[in-house]
Image: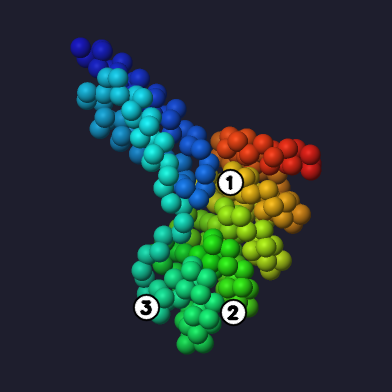
Amino acid sequence: MRKVAACRKEAMISFYLQAFKKLQFMTRQIPTRASLYFILMIVFMGCKGASGAEEKQEDKTKENRHMSDEPAQVQLGTAEEEAFRQAAHDGELEKVKALLKQGVACDAVDQDGRTALMFTAFNGHSEIVILLLDARAKIDKRDSLDRTALLYCATGPFPETAKILLDRGADPNTVDSNEHFSPLMHAAAEGHLEVVKVLIAYGADRSLKDVDGDDAASFAAQSGHMHVVEYLNLSE
């Protein structure tokens, strides 16, 4: 019985490692791949009575991928700072202007290190991006996931916003320290061809690879965005 149980546990571990090793890179749905700790925790919690559960668990795994990757709006600091980030997120230009005039710190962060610039770039509010940069917001400031405003912006269909950030000095080849995802990888994975074109025009390196050795074209292919793959291959 011990041998059978051990084999079952080994099979479960193998299954979950395969399921989680390369989560589909949909960056506006899930921020990072699952950690090994999380994988093993699920495995050992699910080993009892797990016979025949692989297909059901795979369905649950797919459901769990649809986690919002939108910068979490967590309260921190003054009520004014919270309102400032919320207004930037929602695209309320006049409210952002008013709060800046009241002296709210432009780079005030929530508990995950996210700034108003990150929130507004994520939603493509170009006018507010310009306003915040004119107010000397730090363009390459990083949050707790080691992401910048451009990394957030690149997950959405906002080529003009991306261009503004790049014009103002954002690094087109910045990567996070955990997975080494670049803005180009984010845009390619989401199928945002116009954002990909902007990034390439500003010097984005299509040969950059993440920690698993995948480049932007690989992510586009995995997500079924063959028009992006074709562009990346033809524009070399």
Q: Is residue 35 visible?
A: no
Residue 69 appears left or right of 77? right
Residue 80 appears left or right of 148? left
Check disc 1 and report the residue beneath it.
190
Per the rendering, the mark at residue 12 is: none
Q: Position of residue 167 (x, y in %)?
A: 71, 66
Q: Position of residue 105 (x, y in %)?
A: 48, 79
The residue sitting at 46% across, 41% down in the picture is: 33
**The disc labelled 3 sits on which kind of residue?**
Thr
Task: For the residues labelled 1 and 2, say whether their Cβ atoms are less than 8 Å apart.
Answer: no
Q: Callout 2: helix, strand or loop? A: loop
Residue 174 occupies which quadrant of the picture? Answer: bottom right
Check disc 2 and report the residue beneath it.
135
Q: Is residue 81 visible?
A: yes
Q: Position of residue 99 (x, y in %)?
A: 48, 83
Q: Earlier in the sequence, mark 1 or mark 3?
A: 3
Q: Earlier in the sequence, mark 1 or mark 2?
A: 2
Crowding at dot 3, Cα within 10 Å, few <14 / some 14-19 / many 20+, comes out as: few
Q: Position of residue 180 (x, y in %)?
A: 57, 46
**The disc labelled 2 sits on which kind of residue?**
Ala
